[in-house]
Amino acid sequence: MKSLQSYYGLVGRNAMNVTAQNKLDAFVPQNEIVALYDKWAGVWDVWSRLIETRARARAVYLAAVGDGQSYLDAAVGTGLTFREVVRRNPNGENIGIDLSEGMLALARQRLLPVKGAHYELQKGSPFALPAHGASIDVLMSCFLFDRIPFAWMDTLLAEFRRVLKSDGKLIMAHMTEAPYIFAKGYEIIYHLAPKAVGARRGVCLSERLVQNGFQVERREYVQQLLFPMEIIRAYL
């Protein structure tokens, strides 16, 4: 497994190479993402509540985590989604990882009032998940794939396949391509100042999931403050 330093160096170069071919690939080199989210951590909840609450609520609903299951959040952020799942799964295994220490610090504070539940929050890469093979019932990926280059998505999905049980669920929520003209303003902002939207651009992942061995059971479109998002539930 590559070290985080070598991983970021490679991804940064790939991101810049691919942008010439696809205008909506990752414009921000991945080695700048962690610093961006550390900087924004203190105000991220405001942004998230303005544009992400509907998508996160649907993701938690579609996850349908039952008490006693194994749950892993591959980009836990400030813990908004993670907290809701831990409350539903106090006796299960709940793992949340993120590369941003600033985000993790807020997630730890958010989970303090949740007493008696089993959970752990740790710094880590979604490309090297802290779980044994075929050990996870529900894997959550919220607002992760919309900020990584297309060239690395298959590698990430392979890691997801590795940790999921044969009947495990993958739940995804991320920015997607807008079907309505008024929601396409975020694409313009992304082209002009990608960091202003958290380095995230619209992606549609159903086809890529199928190509990587997943069965897409459900795909929903949610829009909040004209912010276009898709929520996906998929199985192996």
Image: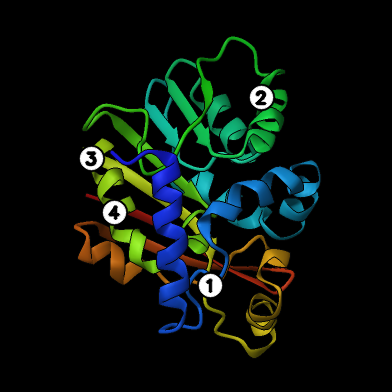
Q: Nearer the viewer, mark 4 or mark 3?
A: 4
Q: Position of residue 44 (x, y in %)?
A: 75, 48
Mark 4 touching mark 2, by CB under 8 A?
A: no
- The answer to which image quadrant residue 186 occupies is bottom right
Name the residue tied to disc 2. 108
Q: Secondary structure at mark 3?
A: helix
Q: Residue at x 72, y 24 (%)?
A: 109
Residue marked by disc 4? 155
Mark earlier in primary sequence (3, 2):
2
User: Within 10 angstroms of label 4, few (less than 14), some, or many (20 or more) residues?
Assistant: few
Circle 2: residue type = Arg
| Secondary structure at numbered mark 1 | loop
Could you tell me the amino acid type at mark 1? Gly
Q: Which residue is mark 3?
A: 162
- Give whichever of discs 4 and 2 has the lower sequence position: 2
Image quarter of residue 17? bottom left
Q: Which residue is mark 1?
A: 202
